Amino acid sequence: MAEESYLQSLKTAIATGDIAAKTRMAATWFRSIVERAKIALSRETVFQTVITEAAQAGGLTSKMWLGKMYFFVYNPKHKMTLPYYDMFPLVLPVERYSDGFLGINFHYLAPKERAHLLDEIKIFVNDKTLSEKTRIMLTYDMLRGFTKFKRAKPCLKRYITMYMKTQFIPILPDEWGPAIFLPVENFKKMSKKAVWMESKKIYSTIRK
């Protein structure tokens, strides 16, 4: 039996009005963290419950691996001049720097487009069993020009470690699907639908 794509998983869930039990469990866990994260964001502080909840449910870490997926609370350095930004990113890091990293934040795309992008880049996994060690071996050089992965262009963001308000909340490979479909983006200055429209304008101009 062929492996079901992330896009097909989303279509199936919409068509049947149901999702797998594991997805429901993951969604419950992620949402519990998000509710606490919102409190932290409103006070511009690191709310201890966010860290505690993540640690109890799936671990929370200061270590970051390229090609893995993470949630974290982020308060951008240049938030006053940015046209919009996401304070609860879902990021796949692709390049490391001394003060942070470059990564793909899936929240800048609508759920259907997130699934498209993840399906496109998952061919670079180093382990198709989706074990804890699985990573997507994608680099910035592979993305350059964005002709092969045009949806990645509006999602590629630079993150500075000192502006992270929590440690990383790691998402295990078999939870990537539930994670990208959850409505947990936290955009400021613009609605999520407006952000998604802006992203579509950006990647729609790219020609293969």
Image (tube, helix red, strand yellow):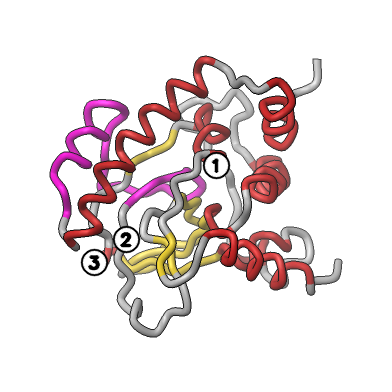
Q: Quadrant of residue 70?
A: top left
Is 147 situated above or below 22? Answer: below
Q: Amino acid at mark 3?
A: Met
Horizontal side of residue 26 vs 123, given as left or right? left
The residue at 43%/72% (across/down) is: 189
* Mark before the other along the chain sequence, 3 or 2: 2
Q: Nearer the viewer, mark 3 or mark 2?
A: 2
Q: Residue furthest bottom?
A: 81
Between 123 and 159, the one nearer to me in the picture:
159
Question: Which mark identifies residue 162?
Answer: 3
Horizontal side of residue 93 vs 5, given as left or right? left
Alpha-carbon distance for marks 1 and 2?
A: 18 Å
The residue at 61%/56% (across/down) is: 109
| Location of residue 187 in the rendering, given as x and y in whole percent from the top left corner | 44, 62
Between 186 and 172, the one nearer to me in the picture:
186
Question: Which mark identifies residue 72?
Answer: none
| Helix, strand or loop at mark 3 | helix
Magenta stretch contains residue 71 = yes
Q: Residue furthest right?
A: 208
Magenta highlight range: 46-72
| Location of residue 27 in the rendering, given as x and y in whole percent from the top left corner | 44, 29
Alpha-carbon distance for marks 3 and 2?
A: 9 Å
Magenta stretch contains residue 74 = no
Question: Which mark identifies residue 180?
Answer: 1
Q: Where does the N terminus fall, quadrant-wise?
A: top right
The residue at 66%/41% (across/down) is: 122
Q: Residues within 10 Å of mark 2 (few under 14, many from 20)?
A: many
Q: Amino acid at mark 2?
A: Tyr
Is 112 situated above or below 82? Answer: above
Alpha-carbon distance for marks 1 and 3?
A: 25 Å
